[in-house]
Amino acid sequence: MKRERIVAGNWKMNLNAQEATLLAKQVAEATMDVNGTTVILFPSFPFLSLVYAEIANGRVAIGAQDCSSHEKGAYTGEVGAGMLSSLGCRYVLIGHSERRTYFNESSALLINKIRQVLQHKMRPVFCFGEKLEDRRSGQYFQVVKEQLLSVLSGFELNELQQFILAYEPVWAIGTGETATPQQAQEMHAFIRQVLSENYSVEFASGISILYGGSCNAQNAKELFACADVDGGLIGGASLKSADFSAIMHSF
Ligand code: PGA
């Protein structure tokens, strides 16, 4: 297992078809001189094919923001992992704090979603992070450890090797308040320590751990320079091609 540098754009529920197509084209162009960094775009479901058509240069991959925990069948409105992989998706975001908060997604549900992702040969980008009250009360290490292990414990090591982790402190998401490089590094190092205690040193040092939460063109360089930060999951700043391009070039 080798650690990868990754810059991923989570477009959330933004853009229309024309805007998504244009942004994908701009991102594809901006990756022409990016070497050694995996770039992933996470558009909304309806735009996956449009974006896929624009990233034909092969330097950008696409992923979905969510998937169903069911394989297929009578689940109106749901989107199955098999459908996503048939569209060219290679990644799926799982456990984003917005899904946990607004759609009550539990660790048990996340495990079932990840099973679907793995079954269809895609990689989960598993998101977790503490809330502001956890940070203030000093409980943040414990909270992060529990979120992490409650889901990872559902899988075997060979499955876990497909995971990408994204530490996203909830107080930093969309707030303009970023974790300092020290805070990010401290947590990423802690995550690797938890993984080496529960699995192996090799696994802990090989897995990619992204930082997310108000990462932007100004602060990405400093965050990505941290020893245990392997890149970023970018929300707001991924919607502007110039900003996202600057972030892609921040390593
Ligand atoms: P943000 O979102 O960059 O807008 O804070 C990050 C995320 O939710 O993944």
Image: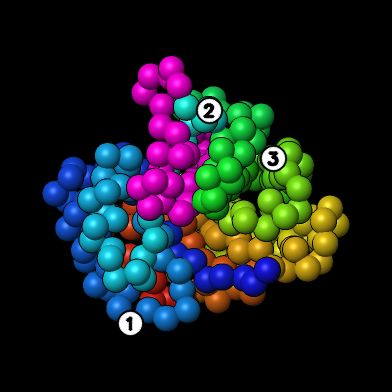
Q: Amino acid at mark 2?
A: His
Q: Residue 4: name its quadrant.
A: bottom right
> Residues under labels 1 and 2: Cα distance?
39 Å
Residue extending farthest to the left is 18
- Helix, strand or loop at disc 1? loop
Residue 136 place in picture, x, y as percent: 65, 43
Q: Residue 195: name its quadrant.
A: bottom right
Residue 147 place in picture, x, y as percent: 69, 40
Q: Amino acid at mark 3?
A: Val
Q: Which numbered tag is attached to residue 54?
A: none
The part of the chain drawn in magenta is: 73-101
Q: Which numbered tag is attached to residue 151?
A: 3
Residue at 76% in and 48% down: 156
Q: Sequence order check: which comes first, mark 1 or mark 2?
A: 1
Q: Sequence order check: which comes first, mark 3 or mark 2?
A: 2
Task: Please indicate whether residue 20 sits to the left or right of residue 141 in the image.
Answer: left
Q: Badges 3 and 1: C-beta atoms under 8 Å apart?
A: no
Task: Please indicate whether residue 27 sits to the left or right of residue 126 in the image.
Answer: left
Q: Which residue is mark 1?
A: 33
Name the mark nearer the viewer: 1 or 2: 2
Q: Sequence order check: which comes first, mark 3 or mark 1?
A: 1
Is residue 173 magenta-colored? Answer: no
Residue at 26% in and 54% down: 51
Q: Residue 220: name its quadrant.
A: bottom left
Q: Which residue is mark 2?
A: 70
- Helix, strand or loop at disc 3? helix
